[in-house]
Amino acid sequence: MISIVRGLKEYYLKPQVGAQYNYRFETIIDDFTNEKRPIQKSCIRDVMIMPIEKQDSLEIYQIFTSKITIKSNVSIADEYLIKQLGYVFDEIEAGVDFSGKIVKIYNLKALQFRWNLKQEELEQDYIGASVYSYFKNIGRILNNESQLIDFLSDYKMFGLYFHGLFGNYLLWEMPIKRELRIEDFEYTIVNEQIFPEKRDFVKYKIEGKSEAIDEYKGELIYNEFQLQEALIVCENKMHSIKYGALFLG
């Protein structure tokens, strides 16, 4: 009886308590709406992921964002504000289950308290409908643990690392199928198919279909039970979005 997928019976992260894993996460958005002047924007986050303990069936991680860099071929209005809003989520303490999915936020109250202070500070310098919309959205996310988990699990945050795809793999259950929304494509629904396979390394090949996206593909590369690099690409005629992660050591 065949019970493996290309040599891969099962796969899990094997975090070492006290270790520090440094990553660079990047989101690149290309806008081709104006053919004569395409716009490219990127957001780069330097992140340290630290397993700190195990409680019951959950691995507890600290996720620390040390630096946010924004780049573009055009000027970016309120770049400082955008960075400050990003740093609202710079210290996360998350509970992660066996599949690698975030299921609990342990420092939710601290995040809410810090946001209240930061919002009061920013309101002294920033006003307007767009600013109010930013603040309202962050408040909505932080007031609901489930929404915060969904936000942190998005590919543009930490979803390339904490994706919930680990487990036992049986040939007749492949590929792994799931539905998700791509916020940067106006919450377009994508039907993903994930193909785990083992070669000299472990690779998760990802394909997707959506009415609003012409091309959707990606891969996650692992070695020694640790993510080495990841890339998701979704494109249509007007936009191209790339989500990437790279292990720095």
Image (cartoon, helix red, strand yellow):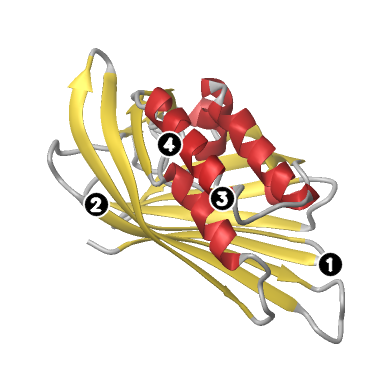
Identify the secondary structure beneath mark 3.
helix
Asked if labels 3 and 2 touch by Cβ distance under 8 angstroms, the answer is no
The foreground one among 202 and 185 is: 185
Instruction: Pick out the residue farthest to the left.
Output: 18
Q: Report the amino acid beneath label 3.
A: Leu
Identify the secondary structure beneath mark 4.
helix
Q: Earlier in the sequence, mark 4 or mark 2?
A: 2
Task: State the image coordinates of residue 82 (x, y, percent, origin top left).
Answer: 58, 58
Q: Residues within 10 Å of mark 4 (few under 14, many from 20)?
A: few
Q: Earlier in the sequence, mark 1 or mark 3?
A: 3
Q: Report the amino acid beneath label 4.
A: Arg
The answer to whether residue 72 is visible is yes
Asked if labels 1 and 2 touch by Cβ distance under 8 angstroms, the answer is no
Residue occupied by mark 3: 122
Residue occupied by mark 2: 21
Asked if labels 4 and 1 touch by Cβ distance under 8 angstroms, the answer is no
Tell me the distance, in whole angstroms, between the alpha carbons under discs 2 and 1. 37 Å
Residue occupied by mark 1: 237
The foreground one among 221 and 19 is: 19
**What residue is at 35 percent from the left and 23 percent from the top?**
106
Which mark identifies residue 224?
A: none
Task: State the image coordinates of residue 186 (x, y, percent, origin top left).
Answer: 78, 46
**What residue is at 29 percent from the left and 21 percent from the top?**
58
Tell me the distance, in whole angstroms, between the alpha carbons under discs 4 and 3. 12 Å
Q: Residues within 10 Å of mark 1 (few under 14, many from 20)?
A: few
Q: Earlier in the sequence, mark 2 or mark 1?
A: 2
| In the displayed structure image, the side of residue 96 where residue 56 appears, left or right | left
**What residue is at 32 percent from the left and 47 percent from the top?**
64
Residue occupied by mark 4: 114
The foreground one among 129 and 111 is: 129
Task: State the image coordinates of residue 147 (x, y, percent, origin top left).
Answer: 59, 27
